[in-house]
Amino acid sequence: MADSPMGNMMYATFSDIAESIRRLPEEKNISAACFNELRELYIDNGWRRIYEYDGPDAGIDYVRVHLKKGGSVLRFRWDHYDQGSVAGPRRYIEEIARYVRENCGQ
């Protein structure tokens, strides 16, 4: 994790850019309530936080949390413009897409 608020913001921005370049599979436009529910569901199922954005707008305008289990990492991101998204390995993104369809009315 980044040691300073500025370092944390730079890491979050770098993560956004890296994800778009790598074109990780991603589920997008997840409502705030569903996004929070999903994040907690994965944490409750043994995924551990390896990064959490804590800049001045954390939890207000922007959320970024990376969760890891085994060799897999899920990148949760939320902002007012794009709503929630999760990027990561295809098998987990397919699982997340199914959960969103079946449980979040999206």
Image: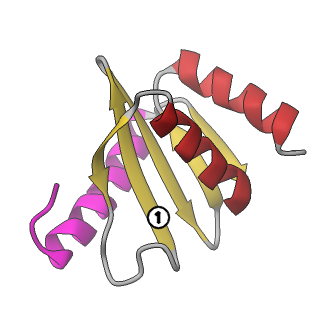
Mark 1, residue position = 63
x then y, percent, for residue 59: 48, 73
x then y, percent, for residue 77: 50, 55
Front residue (pair 26, 76):
76
> At x 31% / y 61%, what residue is drawn?
12
**Mark 1 crowd level (few <14, some 14–19, many ≥20, 10 Å Cα):** many
Examine the residues drawn in magenta and state their main secondary structure. Answer: helix
x then y, percent, for residue 29: 71, 52
**Residue 94 appears in which quarter of the rendering?**
top right
Q: Which residues are magenta?
A: 1-22
**Residue 20 appears in which quarter of the rendering?**
top left
> At x 15% / y 69%, what residue is drawn?
7
x then y, percent, for residue 30: 71, 51
> At x 55% / y 61%, what residue is drawn?
78
Q: Is residue 31 visible?
A: no
Three-letter code for the amino acid on which mark 1 is drawn: Val
Number of callouts in the render?
1
- Taking the image as shown, residue 43 lies to the left or right of residue 79, namely left
Quick one: quadrant of the N terminus? bottom left
Q: Confirm whether the magenta stretch covers residue 14.
A: yes
58 in relation to 101, above or below = below
- Taking the image as shown, residue 58 lies to the left or right of residue 15, namely right
Q: Secondary structure at mark 1?
A: strand
> At x 27% / y 56%, what residue is drawn?
14
Q: Is residue 62 visible?
A: yes
